[in-house]
Image (cartoon, rainbow, N blue to C red):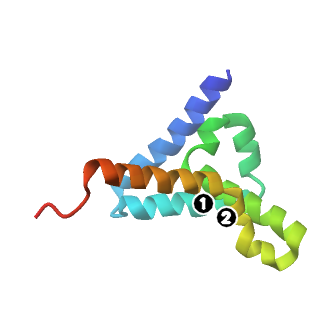
Amino acid sequence: MEYLNAFLCGGILCAIGQILIDKTQLTPARILTGYVVVGVLVSALGLYQPLADWGGAGATVPLTGFGHALAKGVKKAVGEQGWLGILTGGLSATAGGITMAVTAGVVMALIFKPGDKR
């Protein structure tokens, strides 16, 4: 049942993104950024954790899950460090994901020689 929930949750989030791409003038970059912001807002309202508990990786792996992790990190850091936690909490909570994204980007740039093809 855990796999089915993850599949359904992740699939619904991806389907919403595909509908936004197909039916609106929004660029993929704006949609992806919007997903992170929505994850932060839904987490701030206290609604994302129950979704993550039900959907597992289907809720935590997409970009809404990244926004949720940012919000949780800020909340924890503010509780521990005060207002300084606003600046440090999100980055410390998501450092692993950010590091992996930067590392993968560098490796791909080394392998595929990016640049303008004109």
Q: Residues within 10 Å of mark 2 (few under 14, many from 20)?
A: some
Q: Residues within 10 Å of mark 1 (few under 14, many from 20)?
A: some
Residue 76 is tagged as none
Query: Where's the N terminus, which quadrant?
Result: top right
Q: Amino acid at mark 1?
A: Val
Q: Which residue is mark 2?
A: 91
Picture quadrant of residue 4:
top right
Q: Residue furthest bottom?
A: 83
The residue under the point 62% across, 24% down is 3
Where residue 71 appears, x then y in whole percent? 72, 62
Is 50 placed left or right of 117 in the picture? right
* SS under mark 1: helix
1 and 97: which is toward the camera: 97
Q: Residue furthest top?
A: 1
* SS under mark 2: helix
- Cα–Cα gap, marks 1 and 2: 18 Å
17 and 32: which is toward the camera: 32
Kindly tell me whether residue 75 is visible in this rendering. yes
The residue under the point 18% across, 64% down is 116
Where residue 29 appears, x then y in whole percent? 40, 62
Q: Say if 27 sits above or below 84 in the image.
A: above
Q: Amino acid at mark 2?
A: Leu
The residue under the point 45% across, 59% down is 31
Q: Which residue is mark 1?
A: 38
Is 42 placed left or right of 16 in the picture? right
